Amino acid sequence: MPAEEWATAEHALRYLARADAYPHRAEGEGVLLEQVPGDARRILDLGTGDGRLLSLLSRDRPGRVGVGLDISEPMLQAARERFLDDRRITLLEHDLTEPLPALGRFDAVVSSFCIHHLEHERKHSLYGEVLDLLEPGGVFANLEHVASPTHRLHLAFFAAIEEPLEDEDRSDRLLDVETQLGWLRELGFDDVDCYWKWLEMALLVGVKPVGS
Ligand SMILES: C[S@@+](CC[C@H](N)C(=O)[O-])C[C@H]1O[C@@H](n2cnc3c(N)ncnc32)[C@H](O)[C@@H]1O
């Protein structure tokens, strides 16, 4: 089961120790922050990990209320510690292979480097659930690990992040950008595009049409 390894503290802590070291990551996160309107009040983070994205989105947004979902207890513990004094953040254990829980509507749904752990069929159905959860005009911003078009480029990505290919996450289920953008359009998102990309890191964005 793909998510199993995230249940171990060793795997979670190994990722967290490296999280700041991925080249160009801050650029992608910066573009994601630009796409989430400053007045977005309710924000849902899928696979929140230690709450990194929710924390970034909290800066200069005093009115925001955040919900972070994750399956990993070690990750949720790290997030609880991060948000110890922040009552506007709710952290919930949830397996994203299952349908999203009823949490009300959100102005923005974000995710970073999580959805690629789901099987492709589940990625697709999750995108549909995200559209349903968004308020009209709400934005979905998914900073994601995507598939390279060729094996050579896959090797180049691992070389660029200075990670041996043997250490590739066994829970990865990488999918190309074009397929995912096509799905978002078919599902009914507006303004769908890849807003930023560096090798296998890409920011996929779609907006729920205002009239829906
Ligand atoms: C690479 S980490 C990214 C964490 C965080 N979003 C960040 O940007 O630092 C991937 C996260 O996805 C979570 N995850 C993987 N599979 C999951 C699943 N089936 N349901 C919920 N969370 C899952 C992991 O527990 C982990 O926290």
Image (tube, rainbow, N blue to C red):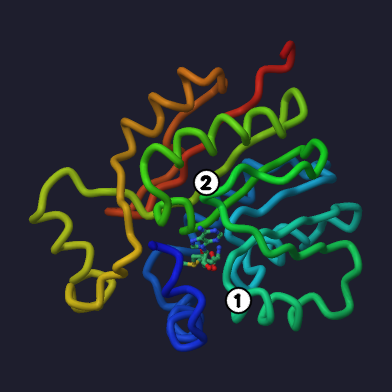
Spatial distance from mark 1 to mark 2, Cα to Cα? 19 Å
Q: Position of residue 124 (x, y in %)?
A: 45, 34
Frontmost of labels 1 and 2 is 1
Q: Residues within 10 Å of mark 2 (few under 14, many from 20)?
A: many
- At x 58% / y 57%, what residue is drawn? 95
Residue 76 percent coordinates (x, y) = 66, 74
Q: Quadrant of the C terminus?
A: top right
Q: Quadrant of the N terminus?
A: bottom left
Q: Earlier in the sequence, mark 1 or mark 2?
A: 1
- Asked whether the residues under the numbered discs 1 and 2 touch, taking CB atoms below 8 Å apart as contact, a structural biologist would say no
Q: Residue visible at 44% across and 70% down?
A: 4
Disc 2 marks a residue whose amino acid type is: Asn
**Pick the front one: 25 or 207:** 207
Going by the numbered disc 1, the residue's amino acid type is Met
Residue depicted at 51% across the width and 50% down the height: 97
Mark number displayed over residue 75: 1
Residue 21 picture quarter: bottom left
Please count the marks in the image.
2
- Residue ranking furthest to the left: 152
- Label 1: how many Cα within 10 Å (few below 14, some 14–19, many 20+): many
What residue lies at 42% left-to-right and 36% top-to-bottom? 194
Q: Which residue is mark 2?
A: 142
Which residue is most to the top?
211
Nearer to me, 39 or 168: 168
Mark 1, secondary structure of its residue: helix
In this rendering, is residue 137 above or below 130? above
- Provide the secondary structure element on which disc 2 rests: strand
Q: Relative to 16, is 155 above or below? A: above
Mark 1 CB in 8 Å range of ligand 1? yes
Q: Position of residue 209 (x, y in %)?
A: 66, 18
| Residue 67: image location, x then y, percent | 76, 56
